[in-house]
Image (cartoon, helix red, strand yellow):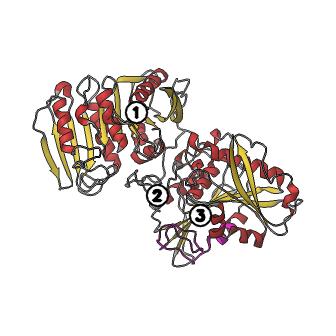
Amino acid sequence: MKSQRRFQKFTFALALTISTAILWGCRPAAEQIFTPASPVASETAASGQYEHPGDTQIFMRLEGVERTFLVHIPPGYHSGTLTPLVFNIHGRTDTAEHQQEISQMNAKADEVGFIVITPQAEDDPPTWWGAVPGAIGAPDIAFFGGMLEYLQSELSIDPARIYATGFSNGASMTNRLACAFSDVFAAVAPVSGGHVGYYDCEAAQPISILAIHGLEDTIIPFEGNEINPPVLAWVEAWAERNQCDSTPKVDSPNEEITRQTWGDCLPGVDVALYAIANAGHTWPGSEFVADGNGTTTAINATDIIWDFFAAHPKTAGKITPPAPSPTPPGTGSAAYPTYGDHFSTISSGGIKRTFKLHIPHRYASDTATALVLNFHGRTSNAFAQEQLSEFSLLADEQGFIVVYPQATGSPSTWEDFPESGSGVDDVQFTRDLIAHLSIELNIDPARIYATGLSNGGGMANRLACDLADRIAAIAPIAGGYYDWEKCTPSRPVPVIAFHGQRDEIIPYYGTNLEGVVNLPALPIWAADWAARNQCAPAPKHTSTGGVITTDSWSHCANGADVVLYSLTMEGHYWPITTFGGDVFDPTTVNDLIWEFFTAHPMP
């Protein structure tokens, strides 16, 4: 169940279509079920092979897929002595060997006497999808479960001293491991990493956290972006989860480092954050930097990490959650019996389709409730769209249900124009999804709405054209409106749209290039909807400080108003402009959308 989010709220402002790092959050610990490893292939015959120091590459087959990891044994290891274990996890596009090189973790292991496991990610480029909530991440979670099972059977591992660290996407994976295996890991140390979905992490046991991050990181920015929350937000979440003091102690070991330490946590647990000035996406102490923004020799991350690990063996305590506030007895749904978040699937068009569902605590099974479909952009996913749009927050405030459907394909793409030729029918998927949710939950058929960003905004527009019997109104953002002149809805559909005039991906003024798919200029597209809805021909035109222009068509058939917000300073992302002339909180945009939706139920 999602927390009440007392953590720092964050604003996102980058295009989903330009992803330099795909780094998302954690899954509730109760759901972490892994398939034990199949018989291990290759060099895993007996634990006696580990009596000699050095590296061994292990091949493991899990559900028909061969996975590999490197085992480093330090000098002096003996099978009769319990020994600490450290997982060292590489970043996206990288390799286990390079992670060994940049971190120099093996050298540290040889110096003080611990075992290092450096696993290799799959995919091209190599990516830890285990950092992504839901089914896509399950194979990586199973891989780590299989490694733990194998290593504890083959090596003399101290169960109180199992740790994980990693860089970038590998650092995000360590956060996910802390959520999934809080009963196993004593501490984790993400370096230049993210933690999307941090508020959904339900670690069953306390776990110490050390985060190290450069203030000039442009790949996973310290202040957050459209995919990753601010570093301080998820570190504070760990501090609250571990029941630490809310106010950290702040000091500076040197002029480049600001260290925050949360104390008075559950017994044996600490949370610390090192913020490094003038450092980019790097492993501090190494020469490696991924974004060209510099590294630092002011600290050695590997030394700090091991010192932290050595001081934090596993405690035997359990997290006792605060007493929940009174809530209604349940949703009344067999499929979705609890409030909060659900990740689920249905069959549509002969294939399995997935979606993320958020049910607000105000939902009552005896009351018909509005439903909002919120579609992600191309290359993105349902979880990132929830983070980006913050519609689950709005749903909790206003009491509606929100569902984030997941597109298919690689990259993930909505078929938002009728003649795409992909063979995937996303309109039918939406119809099937609405039908499924209407059976499981008390959905008000007159208040089903659609919004989305970019390709997802285009999908919302497509639904207004082809599913007007189910969709009451739409709110596309930065959408691409293919085949717009062929739109023939069965009734007038209310439309509110937002588009940045600096959008270079789906240009505000459209495209008209020979041999490519052309897109309309936004004023032409909106005027076309106004004509389709039989509105008065001349819109009301207003301007706010030269930052926002609004064109509103009224006196439409069945009250199907059309509103276009043209955002002078915006690019291709969920709007951040403010009506006061500064850049605004996305909640303001969400409030505008919800106000429009509530004023436009199905006639």
Residue 387 or 598: which is nearer the viewer?
387
Q: Residue type at mark 1: give it.
A: Gly
In front: label 3 or label 2: 2
The magenta stretch is 278-306
Q: Nearer the viewer, residue 436 or 212?
A: 436
Predominant SS along the magenta part: loop
Classify 56 as above or below 430. Answer: below
Per the rendering, the mark at residue 272 is: 3
Distance, label 1 to label 2, CA atoms, is: 35 Å
Amino acid residing under circle 2: Thr
Tag 3's secondary structure?
A: strand
Dot 3 surroundings within 10 Å: few (below 14), some, or many (20 or more)?
many
Q: In this view, does 110 lie to the left or right of 480?
A: right
Q: Does residue 316 appear in this view?
A: no
Residue at point 43%, 40% (across, down): 392
Which badge, 3 or 2, is on the more N-terminal residue? 2
Q: Helix or strand or loop: what does disc 2 sit on?
A: loop
Report which residue position mark 1 lands on.
399
Look at the image and tell me in which quarter the N terminus lies. Answer: top right
For mark 1, give the secondary structure: loop
Callout 3 amino acid: Ala
User: Which circle's residue, 3 or 1, is located before the other in the chain?
Assistant: 3
Q: Where is residue 48 in the image (x, y as percent from the top left)?
A: 88, 57
* Label 3 to label 1: alpha-carbon separation: 37 Å
